[in-house]
């Protein structure tokens, strides 16, 4: 298939948090218009080749938001030109996507993807296929041999976040992210949440978010427990990052520690644990 040059807006930095009907999405504060090659690829929906375009851009399959949702069933799509955002209303589903955002909100669920929503030169909004498919409870299969995508399952709106998220987990995960990573980038906040959930999954640590945060077996694990900032109200951004973590998105499955060297009371972690990566002020370790 032919490759075509296309221009799109990509998120350069995580931006301010905006709220609409108690649902949140990240809007870009700085965007850059980038030209990239894209490849039109076939996509199979319900056993048939889709009657809308699907493009492979920088390794991510994109589909047009309106056409995709209409293929799933009756829906209403409204577009806010000033906010460069779209809202989809369907039976049992409320969904919001914004140009340049890596986050799609669906029924209060935070569906994050490494690639952002974009508006292409045809002035249509395109979204990465995996989060939009998840919003409809569909599975995505990519064939590298045929360079095609197949959707399987039957469209059903995902369970509302009020029922999907364990509210105690969401509350405490949001609080520790807020206390430890207030002012950090959105991805940096998610990475802090990943550390807590990685400890929950590890046999070495307690098996709940609350017990991991307040674990004192080897001394206080998180400074906010000592200084009391864990009890401050969490920021909306931190609660959103907690939702992303609880959806299963992870910066690292291996990170169990993080420190901010300039503020660390001890450098034991950096001297004894394998270094992984740095995001903002935080250094992460196995």
Image: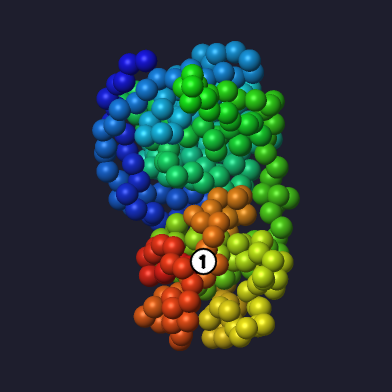
**Residue shown at 65%/78% (left/top)?**
214
Residue at the (38%, 70%) spot, across then down: 281
Q: Position of residue 255 (x, y in %)?
A: 52, 63
- Residue nearest the viewer, comparing 216 with 86: 216
> Residue at label 1?
286
Q: Position of residue 188 (x, y in %)?
A: 44, 61
**Residue 239 visible in the shown view:** no
Quadrant for residue 245, please give it: bottom right
Question: How would you rate the neighbour count of disc 1 (Cα within 10 Å): few for under 14, some for 14-19, many for 20 or more?
Answer: some
Say which residue appears at 67% left-offset and 39% top-offset.
158
Q: Is residue 270 left or right of residue 71?
A: left
Q: Is residue 268 left or right of residue 1?
A: right
**In percent of the image, x 34 and y 53: which residue is there?**
13
Report the label total: 1
* Between 32 and 152, the one nearer to me in the picture: 152
Asked whether residue 242 appears in the rendered view, the answer is yes
Relative height, residue 242 to residue 180 (above, below): above
**The N terminus - image quarter:** top left
Classify residue 222 as left or right of residue 154: left
């Amino acid at each position: 298939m032919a490759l075509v040059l296309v221009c799109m807006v990509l998120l350069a930095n995580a931006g301010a948090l905006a709220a609409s009907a108690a649902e949140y999405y990240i809007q870009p504060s700085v965007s850059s218009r980038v030209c990239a090659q894209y490849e039109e690829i076939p996509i199979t929906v319900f056993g048939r080749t889709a009657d809308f375009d699907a493009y492979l851009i920088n390794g991510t399959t994109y589909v047009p938001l309106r056409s995709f949702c209409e293929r799933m069933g009756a829906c209403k799509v409204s577009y806010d030109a000033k906010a460069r955002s779209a809202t989809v209303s369907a039976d049992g589903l409320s969904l919001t996507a914004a140009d340049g955002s890596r986050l799609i909100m669906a029924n209060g669920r935070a569906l994050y993807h490494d690639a952002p929503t974009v508006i292409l030169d045809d002035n249509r909004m395109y979204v990465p296929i995996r989060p939009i498919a998840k919003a409809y409870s569909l599975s995505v299969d990519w064939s590298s041999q045929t360079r095609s995508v197949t959707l399987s399952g039957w469209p059903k709106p995902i369970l509302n976040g009020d029922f999907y998220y364990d509210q105690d987990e969401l509350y405490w995960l949001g609080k520790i992210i807020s206390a430890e990573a207030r002012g950090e980038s959105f991805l940096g906040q998610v990475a802090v949440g990943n550390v807590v959930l990685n400890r929950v999954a590890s046999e070495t640590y307690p098996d709940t978010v609350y017990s991991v945060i307040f674990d004192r077996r080897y001394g206080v694990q998180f400074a906010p427990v000592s200084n009391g900032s864990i009890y401050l109200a969490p920021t909306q951004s931190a609660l959103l990052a907690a939702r992303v973590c609880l959806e299963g998105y992870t910066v690292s499955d291996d990170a169990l520690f993080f420190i901010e060297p300039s503020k660390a009371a001890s450098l034991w972690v950096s001297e004894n644990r394998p270094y992984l990566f740095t995001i903002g002020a935080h250094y992460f370790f196995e």
